[in-house]
Amino acid sequence: MTEPRGGACRRIVLAAAALLALAATPLHASDAARAQEIVSGKCFICHGADGESSSPVFPRLAGQHSAYIARQLADYKSGRRKSSAMQPMVDDLSAADFAALGAYFAARPTHMHPVEDPELAGMGKFIFGRGNPYSGVAACASCHGANGNGTENLPRLAGQHAQYIENQLRLFNKRERTNDNAVMHAIATKLTELEMKAVAAYISGLK
């Protein structure tokens, strides 16, 4: 028998709430040990032991919100977020593992990173803080905060690799990333190539 649509929605909401509750739970010694085990066995290859990935293809995870990390990992496992690299990495992990990893990376120290093109970043600063009123692009700061620190539901952008930011904006633009806020689709489709590069450059230098 087909489950009523409302029932399915309630199950999704309850599952998301449970995941957030797990991610918000203090990291106990056993959880910390489990997170370290997973990081040492899998995550460090791309993201570094402390979440400071050496390649701009992979996101920096240090200081990212724990609940956000846990949710993204769950989305990779369920297939809501597509990645041929990430899905095999999370297939054998549980919701408790996702919460432990979220807490682990959230506690890693963040670092200030030099901006490669300060002039380009200057243009990005305007877009980040005020958007583009002439094309209808909303300010990034309106959701992610003036310093790019985000919330438990929206990612911390500060200090992220510029190339990674650009790549994600293009995925939102092409509707190839659909697991996060649909508002990003509307924003990304209005950004020019120059604006994407500029805002990504600015974000990469935030602390």
Image (cartoon, grey):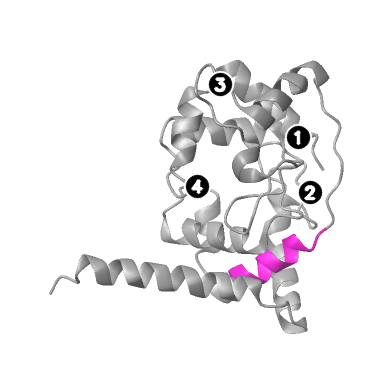
What kind of residue is marked 3? Pro
Which residue in the protein does label 1 denote? 204
User: Which of the two marks, 4 or 1, is nearer to us in this view?
Assistant: 1
Label 4 CA crowd tier, 10 Å (few <14, some 14–19, many 20+)? few
**Alpha carbon separation for disc pair 1 and 2:** 13 Å
Q: Is residue 134 above or below residue 149?
A: above
**Alpha carbon separation for disc pair 4 and 3:** 34 Å
**Alpha carbon separation for disc pair 3 and 2:** 35 Å
Which residue in the protein does label 4 denote? 83
User: Which of the two marks, 4 or 2, is nearer to us in this view?
Assistant: 2
Which residue in the protein does label 2 denote? 52
Q: Earlier in the sequence, mark 4 or mark 2?
A: 2
Stretch in magenta: 98-108
Q: Earlier in the sequence, mark 4 or mark 1?
A: 4
x then y, percent, for residue 82: 46, 48
Residue occupying the point 73% across, 26% down: 125
x then y, percent, for residue 30: 73, 83
